[in-house]
């Protein structure tokens, strides 16, 4: 009897997967990537707040119909999670995240651009940082390329970050936020409110 129940459950799960795959093939899915600074200066409470804020952001974005992906960057950029609505998977990567190294924001932006280049629907990336990139020039070039490809950029930085630079990276000045370090979690969470409802287009 137990085997029959297991097989039935497997059948139901596979059917849901097939239906979900078919749905994704028919409709455009709005996606947003979190680009999380994990450089050495983020060690301690900043990273802890960033992790909590990232989870809150993902939950709120999912509530608006978004799939959320995750990229971390320090001396290099690493793709951790494909855009999805399963928050538990995102949380697993965040829990293992540690701080150290430089701030290679350029590679993070280019990696997000690469991952979203063949997707339809609204696309955005949210850059979360506490400081300056290794190269403002190349980060600006990468951001310009992403925006030229129809991807919105939102930025949030702590009081250590260069506000003017982050505002220039963003698609619009109002899509850039600067907060006190002890308000980092709250600030990251609030970024989800800036995402347009799917189907409403960019800003």
Image (tube, helix red, strand yellow):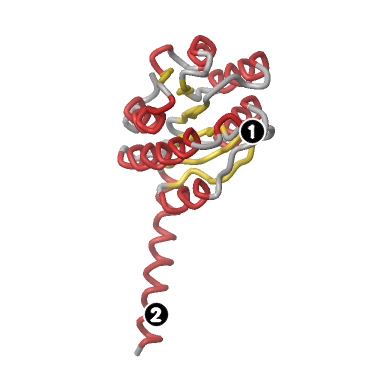
Q: Residues within 10 Å of mark 2 (few under 14, many from 20)?
A: few
Image x and y of residue 12, in percent: 37, 69
Q: Outermost residue toward the bottom?
A: 1
Q: Is residue 71 placed above or below 174 in the rendered structure?
A: below
Q: Outermost residue toward the top?
A: 164
- Looking at the picture, tell me which residue is in the foreground, 189 or 19: 189
Q: Quadrant of residue 63?
A: top left
Image x and y of residue 129, in percent: 52, 26
Image x and y of residue 87, in percent: 41, 49
Q: Quadrant of the N terminus?
A: bottom left
Tell how many labels: 2
Residue on which the image places disc 2: 6
Q: Quadrant of the C terminus?
A: top left
Residue on which the image places disc 1: 74
Query: Which residue is at 55% across, 34% downward?
Result: 116
Q: Earlier in the sequence, mark 1 or mark 2?
A: 2
Q: Quadrant of residue 149?
A: top right
Query: Which residue is at 52% across, 37% downward?
Result: 44
């Amino acid at each position: 009897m137990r085997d029959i129940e297991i097989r039935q459950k497997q059948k139901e799960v596979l059917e849901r997967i097939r239906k979900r795959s078919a749905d994704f093939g028919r409709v455009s899915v709005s996606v947003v990537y979190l680009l999380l600074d994990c450089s050495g200066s983020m060690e301690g409470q900043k990273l802890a707040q960033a992790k909590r804020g990232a989870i809150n952001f993902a939950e709120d974005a999912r509530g608006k119909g978004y799939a959320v992906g995750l990229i971390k960057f320090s001396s290099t950029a690493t793709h951790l999670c494909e855009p999805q609505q399963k928050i538990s998977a995102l949380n697993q990567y965040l829990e293992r995240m540690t701080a150290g190294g430089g701030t290679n924001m350029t590679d993070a932006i280019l990696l997000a651009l690469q991952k979203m280049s063949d997707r339809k629907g609204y696309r955005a990336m949210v850059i979360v940082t506490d400081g300056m990139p290794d190269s403002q020039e190349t980060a600006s070039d990468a951001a310009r390329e992403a925006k030229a490809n129809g991807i919105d950029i939102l930025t949030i930085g702590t009081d250590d970050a260069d506000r003017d630079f982050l505002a220039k990276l963003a698609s619009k000045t109002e899509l850039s936020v600067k907060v006190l370090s002890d308000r980092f979690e709250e600030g990251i969470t609030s970024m989800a409110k800036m995402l347009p409802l799917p189907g409403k287009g960019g800003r």
